[in-house]
Image (cartoon, rainbow, N blue to C red):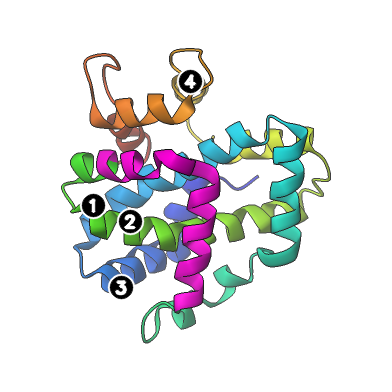
Amino acid sequence: MAGLLDLLNSPMGQQLISGVAGQTNQPEDKTANVLSMAMPLILGAMKKNVSTPEGAQGLMSALSSNHSGGILDNLGGLFSGGVDESVMNDGAGILGHVFGSKQPQVESALSAKSGLDSGSVAQILKIAAPIVMGFLGKQTAQSNVSDGTGMNALLGSMLGGQPQENQSLITSLLDADGDGSILDDVAGMVMGSNKKQGGLGGLLGGLFGK
């Protein structure tokens, strides 16, 4: 089962980092840092959404109709001459669905943690979202996932790839208050607030070797 660690550490991941950095005119190291936080964050929000039958069905329908993974087969073409506006619009739609009204808070939190301006972070997120969906689409097909239970398990495995202790820690941090508000917790942790000691950014940075 391939996880985000496998993707980001692969030659494809390096091509993704280089392409996104070129698109946003930002250094590759800072771009990699944002992606290492943003991509698990997007998957984590999706995992929260599929906890309901409606959310699971909506995600699976989107994967089967528009995000089978073809975008990953031509990353060179994706970044050649600039990312197409249709891809950016698709990313904006995905982010709006998974983050909702919390999206500006997520962008601000990632900006503060990475040192990039929020406008650049927003651009990186719009590119990352279709990539994450494409990766999820490929994994869904390869694993023959057909229901919400399977999708929830798949998302959990894709967020894994590190030692069990750290994987359990990420799972617990996704809703640190136990109040169901994953994005409040994530934003607080990425910001490294007093309420959420350590910070999701620091945790993921360690897991991704950044």
Give the mark toward the camera: 2 or 3: 2
- The tag earlier along the polypeptide, 4 or 3, is 3
The span picked out in magenta is 85-109
- The tag earlier along the polypeptide, 1 or 3, is 3
Q: Residue at x 48, y 20 (%)?
A: 175
Quarter of the image for the C terminus: give it.
top left
**Kind of residue at disc 3:** Gln
Decide: is 166 above or below 30: above
Residue sitting farthest toward the front: 101
Q: Which residue is mark 3?
A: 23
Q: State left or right for residue 147 relative to residue 162.
A: right
Whole-Å distance between the Cαs marked 4 and 3?
Answer: 33 Å
Q: Which residue is mark 2?
A: 122
Residue 191, by quadrant, is top left
Question: Of helix, strand and loop, which mostly describes the magenta segment?
Answer: helix
Mark 4 and mark 3 in contact? Answer it, CB < 8 Å.
Answer: no
Q: Which residue is mark 4?
A: 175
Whole-Å distance between the Cαs marked 4 and 1?
Answer: 24 Å
Q: Is residue 150 magenta?
A: no
**Kind of residue at disc 1:** Ser
Residue 135, by quadrant, is bottom right
Mark 2 and mark 1 in contact? Answer it, CB < 8 Å.
Answer: yes
Whole-Å distance between the Cαs marked 1 and 3?
Answer: 15 Å
- The tag earlier along the polypeptide, 4 or 2, is 2
Q: Which residue is mark 1?
A: 118
Q: Residues within 10 Å of mark 3 (few under 14, many from 20)?
A: some
Quarter of the image for the N terminus: give it.
top right
